[in-house]
Amino acid sequence: MKSSQKLHTLSIITLLFSSNINANKIPTAIAQVAQAATKKVNLVMPNLSDSQIIGKTTGLRPYRTSGIRIEAQKLANDRLLIHNYGHGGAGLSLSWGSSDEAVKAMEKSLAEQNIAGPQNVAVIGAGVAGLTTAHRLRNKGHKVHVYAQLYPPHTTSNIAAGVYSPFSVAVGDSEEQKQQFERMKAVSYAALHELATSSNPEFQGVHILDLYDFSQNAAGQPVEVEFDNGVKKNGTVKPTLFMEGCTYIQHLYEKLLEKGVERTYRTFYYADQLERLPERIVVNCTGLGARDLFDDQELKPIRGQLLYLKPQEGVNYLATEKTEGKKVFFSLYPWHDRLIVGGTLEPEKEEYHADNKTRQEMLDNARQALRDDERK
Ligand SMILES: Cc1cc2nc3c(=O)[nH]c(=O)nc-3n(C[C@H](O)[C@H](O)[C@H](O)COP(=O)(O)OP(=O)(O)OC[C@H]3O[C@@H](n4cnc5c(N)ncnc54)[C@H](O)[C@@H]3O)c2cc1C
């Protein structure tokens, strides 16, 4: 058994919170903020009172113990199956890179069979992995048909708060997997950065916002924050890619339909059902669904809960405070129609029903995180 497969619950949480180690690996100028003199910033304090709460959500991150599965399998009758699932808590961050790898795996297999030119391809799944894979294939001239049980806005990808955070996902043990992971980060980062900075982006909803991190030993430029209610806090700040999930996923989806990609609502119960599709090439982007469909016991969901508050003027920044080993952490994400406060990392919890105790803990934790440093 690989070492990464031996992780028990506690060590998964510890791994997920190792943001200082991982943050050093972000392959971009953005992460490499020069250590400068402490910056002073004034911010609007979010109102976290109960009266602001308008909703809550729970989702399951498709964490896979040996990393995202990108693999081509040749099936009987010249059929080809490509896997692209297991993105954990980093699907929005890594999907452009993983779809690039999946399409390359497909092209390599086709080349080995001396098959060239546009193909008919089925993509199973309409979360961020399926949608970005379908875009890549369509842009390369293939005829694409998406089959899925659920479409936006009802996928896990729609729940993702949307910070570029390629961390709560396993990298894999082999050198090849590590290199592939670095490629996925680089390709995704470049694609998202282009969307955030272009004057005419292909998909809306990707921005660069300042992320204030009040965790101990956080990476980034040191900052002294003074909120408009007088609270003072020390932390770090760094510009961070932010995908406003509801807008971004919806745009990915609508643009696919505009490009003539076909869509069928369909649930698959057995893998061999895929072999009876009219398309000879199938890309499997079913996220956690792959656990049952392909009996992949490496998929270990990590539940996440978030609170939705009324949108608040002036709160146009990201904030976080994490404590190693704690399942509840503070995070703040501003969407145009709500302010999201989170969150949780709950390994192997699968219930979707409202867990009011954890939600109260999340709110108390957020209020505590935004207390004046002197009075904490
Ligand atoms: C609370 C929370 C916060 C998050 N925050 C972030 C973040 O800030 N940044 C980030 O990068 N990531 C974040 N994530 C992680 C991100 O949401 C996931 O990594 C991502 O959604 C995985 O995408 P996916 O397309 O693989 O799966 P999904 O979005 O779950 O899509 C799977 C698709 O496959 C279909 N499907 C599954 N099984 C079948 C079947 N048998 N037959 C037919 N169709 C099937 C589904 O209907 C769906 O269309 C967060 C997740 C949660 C829960």
Image (tube, rainbow, N blue to C red):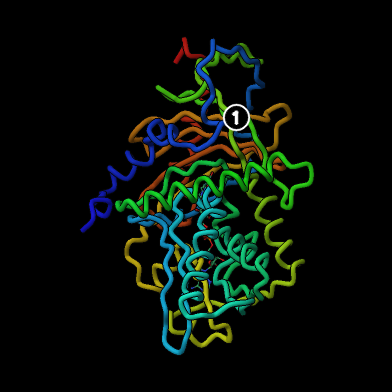
Residues 333 and 76: in front is 76
Whether residue 368 is visible: no
Q: Position of residue 37 (x, y in %)?
A: 54, 10
Quarter-of-image position of residue 46: top right
Whether residue 173 is visible: yes
Question: From what the image shows, is residue 15 above or below residue 156?
Answer: above
Q: Position of residue 23 (x, y in %)?
A: 44, 33
User: Horizontally, is 173 left or right of 331 in the view?
Assistant: left
Q: Position of residue 38 (x, y in %)?
A: 54, 11
Question: From what the image shows, is residue 273 above or below residue 58?
Answer: below
10 Å crowding of disc 1: few (<14), some (14-19), many (20+): some
What residue is at 57 percent from the left and 51 percent from the top?
159
Say which residue label 1 marks: 239
User: Horizontally, is 86 left or right of 278 in the view?
Assistant: left
User: Which residue appears farthest toward the left when viewing the image?
Assistant: 1
Residues 31 and 107: in front is 107
User: Horizontally, is 174 left or right of 261 in the view?
Assistant: left
Q: Position of residue 4 (x, y in %)?
A: 27, 51
Q: Secondary structure at mark 1?
A: strand
Classify the position of the C terminus by image quarter: top left
What residue is at 71 percent from the left and 43 percent from the top?
337
User: Horizontally, is 148 left or right of 89 in the view?
Assistant: right
What residue is at 46 percent from the left and 30 percent from the top?
365
Residues 205 and 110: in front is 110
Residue type of the residue flagged with mark 1: Pro
